[in-house]
Image (spheres, rainbow, N blue to C red):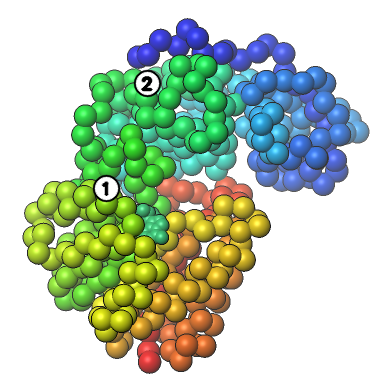
Amino acid sequence: MIDFSHLPTPTNKNIAIKLKPAAERAVKQGHPWIFEDAITKQSHDGVAGDLVVIYDKRKNKFLAVGLYDPNSPIRVKILQANQPAQINQAWFTEKLLKAQSIRQPLIDKGIKGYRLVYGESDHFPGLILDRYNETLVMKIYSAMWVPHLQTVLSALQDTIHFERLVLRLSRGIDTDKFGLFDGQVLIGEAVTEPIQFIENGITLSADVIHGHKTGFFFDQRDNRQRVRELSNDRTVLDVFSYVGAFSVYALVGGAKHVTALDISQPAMDALADNVALNNLSPDTITPMVADAFDGMAYLAKQKQQFDLVIVDPPSFAKSQAEVDRALTSYKRLVQLALPLVAPDGILLMASCSSRVKPDTFFNLIINTANQSGYGLDIIETTSHALDHPIGFPEAEYLKAMFVYIKK
Ligand code: SAH
């Protein structure tokens, strides 16, 4: 365990606030965010991680307790609403046990890589915790968790079995002064190589220190299983492949050949490792390190076609202002993917931008295909896997559509 002596501890003085009526209603209904402009009264200025108690405007009744974040327009993130609570180790323990029980169906299936805590939906706003076998990776998105870190770690050690805990930090958190850094091992042995874990009987590995987010994307687990079922005897193109999770599932499912396309060479190297880990022949996979838009245009120019095309891009809309541009990019990707799908082949299009709503995304796929002279038979539309519960509207981000493409 690292030395926590220079970490701040929670201040004793809770901040008291009152809200505008609409925000009050939202809090009562369980929405976990309070924006700064919804606050009408505040007892005093605080520091990141102070506990905030929200009182009812008229009767001064307890409404909720949350964490203060002076650096975010979402000034308070709610831990618990409607029922007063002492936020202490016992409270974190209770929430961790609840989170684990939600994932029990995955644990029972022998799945060793999953999201144990998904932020607000599991009462840990701005904090995620992913399990990779015996390694837990905690990513914090706000400095408001720093004063509570020791308590959360103690709760974890008391409740959850694990051997190592790695800290990942969102950009913009000024943690240097506390001696924390991204990729720091807080508990357990140093990480010297990618961590292996089993998902649906498939062995995968993740670089939990440098990889995207915590190193891997568990949210696509069910879609990958679907891809495995659809891959037998098919040729597959995996666009935005990252470390090749879809590619490996396709090969295990009997795909004849997979072409994986991603801009990142390290991701492609990790893909080769994941292929080898499952005793699959390297000849069954063609890696392409290129920009996805250019790479797809190149493949079309070569008149290449695939029986199954998977397009799983990164989030294009990180803010509301970027939504229109994101929609343009999705449209472009569909236009590029369509000619790459062999006759009666399948397209899987996914979006992880929470600001692009499922209906908007699905309609965009249908309209773009129709405008380009293609017909579609929808196989199914899907959302997150079970370990990413949608506790409030903004927590919904992943949507995917499987379609047969007809010329
Ligand atoms: N499909 C993956 C997750 C994709 S994450 C899975 O199931 O695990 C998004 C990936 O897109 C990252 O690997 C990133 O390197 C890649 N990427 C981002 N911009 C890109 C671009 N313009 N062209 C190709 N790949 C890109």
Q: Nearer the viewer, residue 303 or 254?
A: 303
Q: Is residue 78 above or below residue 372?
A: above
Q: Residue at x 51, y 13 (%)?
A: 7
- The answer to which image quadrant residue 259 occupies is bottom left
- The answer to which image quadrant residue 155 occupies is top left
**208 lies left or right of 139:** left
For ligand 1, give the image quadrant: bottom left
Which quarter shows the C terminus? Answer: bottom left
Which quarter shows the N terminus? Answer: top left
Q: Say which amino acid is labelled 1.
A: Pro
Q: Is residue 32 above or below residue 357?
A: above
Point out residue 312 in the picture as x, y percentages from the top left corner. Answer: 39, 62
Residue 184 tag number: none
Disc 1 and disc 2 in contact, CB within 8 angstroms:
no
The residue beneath circle 1 is 266
**Number of the front mark, 1 or 2:** 1
The answer to which of marks 1 and 2 sits earlier in the sequence is 2
Point out residue 307 in the picture as x, y percentages from the top left corner. Answer: 26, 79
Point out residue 238 in the picture as x, y percentages from the top left corner. Answer: 30, 66
Whether residue 221 is visible here, answered yes or no, is no
The residue beneath circle 2 is 186
Q: Residue at x 33, y 65 (%)?
A: 239
Q: How far is the residue under mark 1 from the one under mark 2?
A: 25 Å
